[in-house]
Amino acid sequence: MHATFCPDCGSRVFWELEALPGRVAVAAGAFADPGFPTPHLAVWTENKYHWVPLPEGVQALPKQP
């Protein structure tokens, strides 16, 4: 995995996995735009807080595939 971090705050902004060539994973929390597109996949949902709802139609994966 190759991760890229914000130079100001150190937050992970995006990452690339050798297992998924040509794809980039982006941390949706890195965007403050309320019009940001709804994700189609949520990973590590077994660790999300119970009060955080997933949008309808989002595929939920409890762990990394």
Image: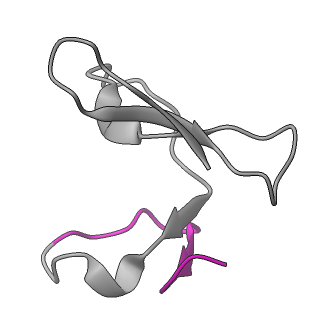
Q: Residue at x 25, y 75 (%)?
A: 48
Q: How far across and down, in percent of the image, does residue 29 sit? A: 30, 38
Residue 59 drawn in magenta: yes
Q: Residue at x 25, y 33 (%)?
A: 11
Q: How far across and down, in percent of the image, does residue 24 sit? A: 68, 37
Q: Main secondary structure of the magenta part?
A: loop
Task: Say above or below: 45 vs 22.
Answer: below
The magenta segment is: 52-65
Q: Quick check: 22 left or right of 18?
A: right
Q: Quick check: 60 left or right of 33?
A: right
Query: Which of the two residues, 46 or 5, is positioned nearer the viewer here?
Result: 5
| Number of marks present in the image shown | 0
Q: Residue at x 27, y 70 (%)?
A: 53
Picture quadrant where residue 36 is located: top left
Farthest residue, direction right: 21
Q: Quick check: 64 left or right of 4?
A: right
Q: How far across and down, in percent of the image, does residue 43 sit? A: 50, 70
The way the protein has been coloured in the rendering is one colour
Task: Work out which quarter of the rendered image holds the C terminus and state it.
Answer: bottom right
Residue 62 drawn in magenta: yes
Task: Say above or below: 38 vs 62.
Answer: above
